[in-house]
Image: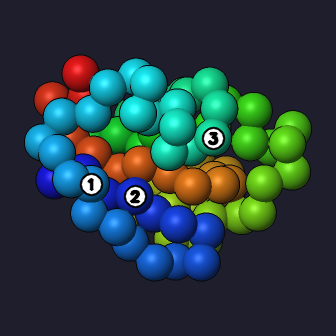
Amino acid sequence: MINIINVDGSLELYKSKKISLEEMQKIVGGYIEFVYMPHDKVLIIDEDGIEKQLPVNAVASSLYQQFTTRNGIIVGRVIFADSNEID
């Protein structure tokens, strides 16, 4: 199940079972970067989000910190998906 995590904490269910590169770029607002998580999950983020000074995404940051040993932050609109849902 592909979810979009907005910076205000709201979630949107993506309309399809697969997501293309072009659609990922449109959703996050730029070039994409994959942040791999346990259990074949992935956060798809804007590669230049920090440089663009996008707002912190508290929900995505919490997921990142909970499931990795890193203490970083995630900014901007984020896609949360299973790795097999990426086209």
Three-letter code, disc 1 = Tyr
| Label 2 neighbour load within 10 Å: few <14, some 14-19, many 20+ | many
User: Is residue 20 at least partly visible in the picture?
Assistant: yes
Three-letter code, disc 2 = Ile
- Are dots 3 and 2 in contact, CB under 8 Å? no
**Distance between the alpha carbons at the discs numbered 2 and 1:** 7 Å
**Distance between the alpha carbons at the discs numbered 3 and 2:** 12 Å
**Distance between the alpha carbons at the discs numbered 1 and 3:** 16 Å
Disc assigned to residue 48 = none
Above-or-below relation of 19 to 21: below
Q: How is the image coloured?
A: rainbow
**Image spot of residue 53 (x, y percent):** 86, 51
Q: Earlier in the sequence, mark 2 or mark 1?
A: 2
Above-or-below relation of 75 to 43: below
Disc assigned to residue 14 = 1
Q: Secondary structure at mark 1?
A: loop
**Image spot of residue 10 (x, y percent):** 46, 78
Q: Earlier in the sequence, mark 1 or mark 3?
A: 1
Looking at the image, how many numbered discs can be counted on the residues?
3
Circle 3 or circle 2, nearest the eye: 3
**Image spot of residue 80 (x, y percent):** 35, 51
Name which quarter of the figure residue 77 lies in.
bottom right
Three-letter code, disc 3 = Gly
- Are dots 2 and 1 in contact, CB under 8 Å? yes
Name which quarter of the figure residue 49 lies in.
top right
Disc assigned to residue 29 = 3
Disc assigned to residue 4 = 2
